Image (cartoon, rainbow, N blue to C red):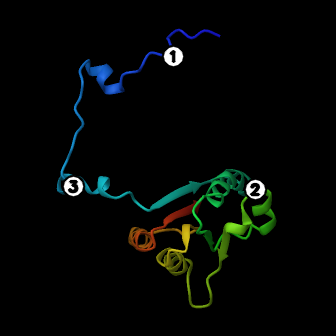
Amino acid sequence: MQFPQSLNRSQLPLFEAFLGQSMAPLLLDSAELPAWLEEPEPISELALSGSLGHCRHLLGPVLRELSQNQDARWLTLVAPPASLTTAWLRSAGLNLDRLLVLQPRAGQNALELACEALRLGRSHTVVSWIDLQPSQRQGLSSAARLGSAQSLNIRLD
């Protein structure tokens, strides 16, 4: 198979090719950086809608990838839906040796439990199923920063 371009030819960076000139790297003092560039947000949300079967089908690869993370810490699921049984987690290919499933105790809610799991730092990622309000999102983000962890919140619509 022949390619239209030589593979030995180096490519120009996109903007240099577009502008036709070399661009010097942009160096900014950290005081000049916008807040969103300083530190990546430790919380992400995934919204899934549709039938329960379809949602689980989409969720399986995400959780599998997280469970196979090379970080020695846990993948923690906080108050997962009842449909995410041990059998389903196993069939989805998750590494159950690196998985911790937590359920809130009496007098505790899933948000408090997720924040505590994040704050302790024994998990690389804490996955929760919470209908987050903006102030709650900030609480999860702060807890994740304290524990050097990531938070993934899943909304099932």
Element carrying mark 2: loop
Quarter of the image where one finds residue 67: bottom right
On the picture, is 93 further left or further right than 78?
A: right
Q: Amino acid at mark 3?
A: Ser
- Give, as a three-letter code, the residue at label 1: Leu
Percent from the top left, x then y, of residue 142? 39, 72
Of pointers 1 and 2, the one earlier in the residue sequence: 1
Q: Nearer the viewer, mark 1 or mark 2?
A: 1
- Given residues 6 and 123, the one toward you in this image is 6
75 relative to 53 in the view: left or right: left
The answer to whether 98 is drawn above or below residue 60 in the figure is below
The quadrant in which the N terminus is found is top right
The label on residue 92 is 2
* 41 in relation to 116, above or below: above
Marks 3,1: beta carbons within 8 A: no
Determine which residue is flagged by label 1: 7
**What element does badge 1 sit on?**
loop
Query: What numbered label is drawn on residue 30?
Result: 3
Q: Determine the residue located farthest toward the front in the rendered image.
A: 8
- Residue 2 to residue 132: above or below: above
Q: In the image, residue 133 lies at what x, y percent? A: 44, 69
Question: CA–CA distance between discs 3 and 1?
Answer: 39 Å
Q: CA distance from mark 1 to mark 2?
A: 39 Å
- Say few, some or many: other residues with alpha carbon within 10 Å of mark 1 (under 14 / 14 to 19 / 20 or more): few
Q: Residue at x 31, y 55 (%)?
A: 36
